[in-house]
Image (cartoon, helix red, strand yellow):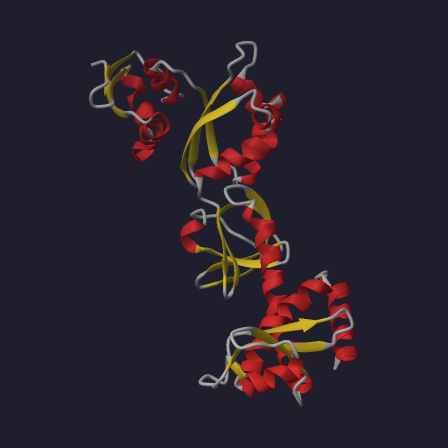
Amino acid sequence: MANELMAALELLEKEKNIKKEDLLEALKQPLITAYRKYYGAGENVFVDIDGNGVITVHEKKTVVEEVEDYDSEITLDEALTINKNAAVGEVVEIVTKPKDFGRIAAQNAKQMMVQYIREAERGKVYKEFVDKQNDIVTATVQKHDRRGVLLEIGNVETLMPLHEQVPGETYKTGDRIPVYVLEVKNTTKGVQILVSRTHPGLVRKLFEREVPEIADGTVEIKSVAREAGSRSKISVYAENEKVDPIGSCVGQKGARVSNVLRSLGNEKIDIIKYSEDPVAYITEALSPAKVESVVIHEDTKSAEVVVPDFQLSLAIGREGQNARLAAKLTGWKIDIKSNN
């Protein structure tokens, strides 16, 4: 048993990169449970496994004059055969190697190893992905089913449900797509990774990846408003007046923003300059429309905006989208009227 056990553990150590010592430690509790089950032992039992795989069972019992609980007590006469200095009231340790326990241990070791390896691998995967929560990863499209799209991220498969997919966007088997990691959960069924293509965080993280000035903090994304698959607005700010936050995001000849657009399936993006002044901020947020005036109502967090009559439809946008995104971006309720 000892030789077979150690050989198995050494093989697992190489193949699964799990320390032999950790496996031996994990094996102890199942063996204690098995010993109690097969030999009717009490709670004061522990198991020792030496470096050669030899298993020894240790059982502690209190010395009494008359035994009432055989699981936890022992007579003085019996105790003296174990420890010649034993006395009533003291605890003696009984070291045993029960008959057939090697076979029982082998059965439990196999079950434990399967479970331990499964848990260790699950823990390894969880540790790898938990730090990627609220970040983007590249996923490979595997197949479609009625519940959504099955993706592979590293060696982990996950389902992107229908409500996290961009309307009208198609995903072909083998496509590599960036997805936003909403949540990573370590469950009894394995590591579950919930991802999205619709979350505003995807836009934010794509710009962080493409724009070094955002990654290093020179340029800050203040807010993102998104209607996935159609249009997004982002507001950006640079404390250093010499830095052009919009130009940094666009890049030379539009290279940086083009890379973001490509990752989003050519979703339209308006990049605007953030301002602490709500009038200036709302004016920028309604671009590309031209604004004549903005009246702020602090008490209701609302704004009355006047635009030229010929700019009204542009300011509101198709089905109200431009005004809706501007309101989401700025956090202000916006009422748009023409100057007529």
| Residue at point 31%, 31% (across, down) | 324
Residue 329 visible from this viewpoint: yes
Closest to the observer: 20 or 11?
A: 20
Picture quadrant where residue 97 is located: bottom right
* Position of the N terminus by quadrant: bottom right
Q: Is residue 47 above or below residue 271?
A: below
Q: Name above or below for residue 247 compared with residue 328.
A: above
Whether residue 40 is situated above or below residue 147 in the rendered picture: below
Q: Position of residue 222 (x, y in %)?
A: 44, 25
Residue 173 can be seen, yes or no: no
Residue at image position (62%, 71%) is 28
Residue furthest toward the top?
Answer: 242
Q: Residue at x 50, y 23 (%)?
A: 220
Name above or below for residue 231 compared with residue 198. above
> Residue 260, image x and y in percent?
56, 34
Q: Position of residue 138 (x, y in %)?
A: 60, 47
Identify the image quadrant of the C terminus: top left
Image quarter of residue 331: top left
Q: Is residue 36 left or right of residue 322?
A: right
In the depicted view, which residue is nearer to us: 285 or 93? 93
- Coordinates of residue 14 in the picture (x, y in percent): 77, 64
